[in-house]
Image (spheres, rainbow, N blue to C red):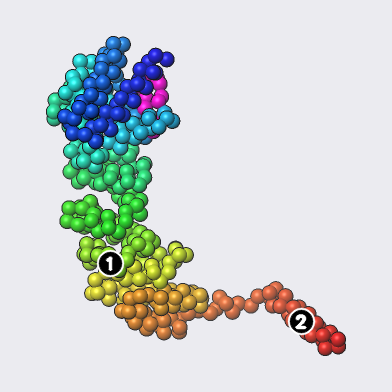
Amino acid sequence: MESYRAFNDFFKILKVTIKNSSIYNQEHPAYLESLKELKNNLDDLFQDTENIKMSFSPNSIFVKDVVYEKEKLYIELANIFHKRKIKTIIFKNTLTESELKYFISKLCLPPRDLIKEGGLRLSLEINKIQKISVEELDYSQLLKGQGEEIKDVWGFLLQEAMVDKNKKKIEEVMANFEQVADDLDIDEIEESLGSDGNFSIFFNYLKGSRSEDLQKCTKVLIKSLIRSKKITEDIRLENLKKLLMDVNDDDIASSFWEEVIADDNFDPLSFSIFSRLMEKKKKDAVEKSLTNIIEAQARKRGPEFKVKIKELFSGSTTPVMSSVYLKTLKSIDEKVSYKGNLEFDQQHLQKNFWYLLLNMFAMQIDRKI
């Protein structure tokens, strides 16, 4: 019980020290006071052991056989370490205050900045901090997260994969691309497609060695943008348009078509967004490919198909797209199959016949009355 209280006190002052480090400069009295208290607290713990080992999950801290969880303090601390891909940390006896100060300064860096430096373990090694050792999480374990965390982690894993040329890591980057694309807004996507952006690095790699995967991931990105419906008139799309210039016209057209079929919420706004993703020259080529797909589908589908296509085209706010597809509407008028709607249904016809007789009988009674 005493050990539990001692570590609880340690976690409290650790949280205060981290907070002070993020608020004040490294020589501020308030920060130095909390750092000193943290060092004294560690010294008290070292009276019973040579090393203090702590492990972290996203929401829990493990010390010896005890789990510190559910309380806000433990969850917040565990999250700080987990986001910095720290699995286990060991403090060794005779740890100095200057070493502890360096450790806290690195721990308080934003996860993105710390991982760009190579992670906490590398920083400690470079600065010869021998009294603190760190075991780091594999990035692939962090990809089980969501939101801001997975966006950052995906980028770090990509950078690692590009440096190491590690096929396993590259496959993990590929496997998680769709989730990342869905989590990013259009401004983040445009930035990521810039010259030094993660998407730019990723697509350039695919362009050089994995053309099929390039087409696949580009289709994922197109579908994500169409579904999000967050592209307004004032949003610039130069980087995205450059990317699509290298993508097969038929693949872009089929991406659009797959969304039309799969998404019940696909509407004229979705269509308008799709039309804005390309430069005019590319758009003309994609329109031709899409027209061929639509006309081919018209032979297989009923009149409801024509109604949906007409709604999409007539609702588009892009005049060029609308004028081109008016010709397509005329074409599918001749190709739409009505066969499905004209099949003879004997049971349905018999039911309607009896309703007709009942109505006629009711009319005769009304006249007599």
Residue drawn at (35%, 75%) of the image: 317
Quadrant housing the C terminus: bottom right
Q: Nearer the viewer, mark 1 or mark 2?
A: 1
- Rendered position, 309 above or below 158: below
**Residues rendered magenta in the picture:** 59-68
Compare residues 349 and 145 and report the one nearer the observer: 145
Dominant secondary structure of the magenta stretch? Answer: strand
Q: Looking at this rendering, what residue extends furthest in the left direction?
A: 127
- Rendered position, 72 above or below 196: above
Residue 364 magenta: no
- Rendered position, 303 above or below 192: below
Q: Amino acid at mark 2?
A: Asn
Say left or right for 256 vs 188.
Answer: right
Residue drawn at (32%, 51%) of the image: 180
Q: Mark 2 sits on what residue?
A: 359
Residue drawn at (40%, 25%) of the image: 68
Residue 104 location (% of width, % of height): 22, 29
Q: Mark 1 sits on what residue?
A: 234
Q: Secondary structure at mark 1?
A: loop
**Residue 75 at least partly seen:** yes
Estimate how packed mark 2 is, as few (under 14), some (14 to 19) or many (20 or more) residues with alpha carbons within 10 Å: few
Residue 262 location (% of width, % of height): 44, 63
Residue drawn at (37%, 63%) of the image: 229
Q: Amino acid at mark 1?
A: Asp
**Residue 54 at least partly seen:** no
Quarter of the image for residue 21 reads top left
Residue 67 magenta: yes
Q: Looking at this rendering, what residue extends furthest in the front direction?
A: 29
Which numbered disc, 1 or 2, marks the residue that appears first in the sequence?
A: 1
Compare residues 217 and 297 and report the one nearer the observer: 217
Say left or right for 36 vs 313.
Answer: left
